Amino acid sequence: MGLLGGLGLFLLGMHLMTDGLRVSAGNALRNILAASTRTRMRGVLSGTFITSLVQSSGAVTMASIGFVNAGLLTLAESVAITYGSNLGTTSTAWLVSTIGFHVNIKLFAMPAIGIGMFLKVFSRKARLAAVGEAMAGFGVFFLGIDLLRDGFTGLHEQVDLAAVSGPGLAKLVMFVGIGILMTVLAQSSSASVAITLTATGSGILMLQDAAAMVIGANIGTTSTALLAAIGATPNARRMATAHILFNVVTGVAALLLLPLLLPLIQLLQGEMHLGSGPVIFLALFHTSFNLLGIALMWPFTDRMVTWLQGRFRAAEEDDARPKYLDRTLVSAPVLALEALRHELRNMLGLTARMCKGVLSSEVRTPLQLEQDTNNITQLADAVGDYAGEMRRSELPDAVAGVLPLAIGISRYCSDNAELAMMVNRREGVFVPGDVREPLNEFRLLAVSLIDAALLTADSEQGGATANDRVDMDMRYQKLKRRMLHAGTLGEVPVRQVIELVELAKDIERIAKQTGKAADGLSAMRAVAENRPEAGAAVVEAGNPVEAGSLVQPDGQGDAAGHVGGQDVLRSTGTHAIDAIVGSGSNKGEA
């Protein structure tokens, strides 16, 4: 019962100490992590320092995962922090060995608990209260060590492990397994190491068996990372894998080299004048084999990071990777144009999914929307690079003429992604009762126009007509008048009226720009299939006034947009881009 109570006090003290130090430090720890990782060595040192300070490698690992997800740290920098956090967690063994076995614990543990709780209860400043919590945790932590020590002192006369102790790899593996099991059950490698140290100091464990248990505790701490990675973000799973690889490789190497390490550590202990006790020996052993692990993993870190980046990819991350832009097709212009069109169709589909989700008021976090926008931006960059590569080669006039369409379509997709984020930000704007239903209908109309546009992009049939787009514009004007009227009646503050009008305008632009991007894709399909007149017909159906400037070179066409023979879409592309995607000051209004 004393052992059980001691373990409980130890874990409680660790919890209080970690939470108190983390809160009292405020943003200092985050600033250190963000600023001290410019090189891998600095990352290791900052991970070691912070883990030693807060006494929790798990807290440091989770913080570094958050920084990776936020883009403040690269995966390579966070892996270096993981190395350091494993080294920093050995500070617990040093605390136990230097203070827990050589000092009358109650002389400072009791005052620490009393003063700490006084600050916790009576301090009005949150940071000072957190310092008090850390002090109380420090005292409880060492009271737990004292109880563990007393419990093992009485136990060593009743428990004889000589029967299972001794040489042999199988027996050492068994003690490694015990260390792993203890860490998994306690969910704390520090607790497992503390038990091992107190058991060894009480004479229950032989030195090599205790060393094997410390190795097991080091490996067992990966269970926390493994559990945290289930259902987590790709970066969390990559970090968890790096943590597991480091600890397993370090543990296996330490176990295989144990016959050599034990005498070397004893020699080092004597040279450093650290005393001759087995507890100090184990603390030094714990630090030494973690340093060995860093030395072993250091040359392979870049390869490991590259391997991890290719694993555990989320669907959202895969969306950012071009699926059709094959560089080997650039020498075959028609095939390259088809690849470009397929990639643009993929990009339009991603944008449409994002916009429909926002317009349908689906629950999407700002982080998800930002990820979608980043993916679309990356695809737009890839499309631009690919189109530039095509332009540098010899192209038929028809293909060269529609290349500006590709840039315009990608621009529309990027714009729509930004507009979707703006619509999502304006979700909290107050909507008057007589405006709410028309606004919802306007949203649904925009969604139906997006669906119709996707049909146009895929089959050139069944898409939105000019009447649909005129209806969209009429509804927008009517809705805007209602919103302005609500403002004049004082139902809505002027600032919110402006927000409502902007919301409606963003929705209209999303629908219109999706339709124009789809028209451009249909025109590209027609050129790729040597049917330029079909592409002109699609554009004419959706934009009857603008089609004339698209289908005739130099803009010499009538307002109805009649087709002028096989030279259709063979201009330099200037008129095509103006007609379908707009240009300059009339962006989004053409």
Image (cartoon, rainbow, N blue to C red):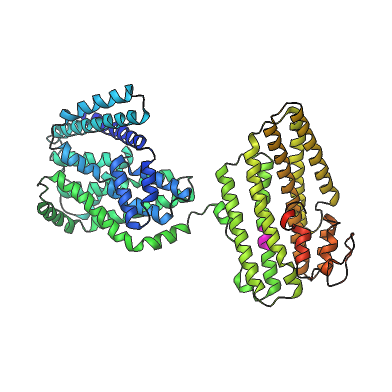
Q: Which residues are magenta?
A: 342-346
Residue 548 rendering spot, x and y as whole percentages: 86, 62
**Residue 559, picture quadrant:** bottom right
Q: Position of residue 360 (x, y in %)?
A: 69, 40
Identify which residue, 264 or 583, lies in the foreground: 583
Q: Residue at x 41, y 51 (%)?
A: 239
Figure check: 425 above or below 34: above
Residue at 38 percent of width and 45 percent of height: 31
Q: Say above or below: 490 vs 94.
A: above
Q: Nearer the viewer, residue 289 or 510?
A: 510
- 105 to the left or right of 246: left
Res 209 seen here? no
Q: Main secondary structure of the magenta part?
A: helix
Farthest residue to the bottom: give it: 394
Residue 184 image point, x, y percent:
33, 41
Quadrant housing residue 557: bottom right
Residue 344 part of the magenta segment? yes
The image shows residue 394 at horizontal and vertical percentages of: 68, 78
- The residue shown at (28%, 50%) is 87
Q: Quadrant of the N terminus?
A: top left
Q: Quadrant of the C terminus?
A: bottom right
Q: Is residue 428 visible?
A: yes
Please check the rendered image and state whether residue 389 is part of the magenta-colored stretch, yes or no.
no
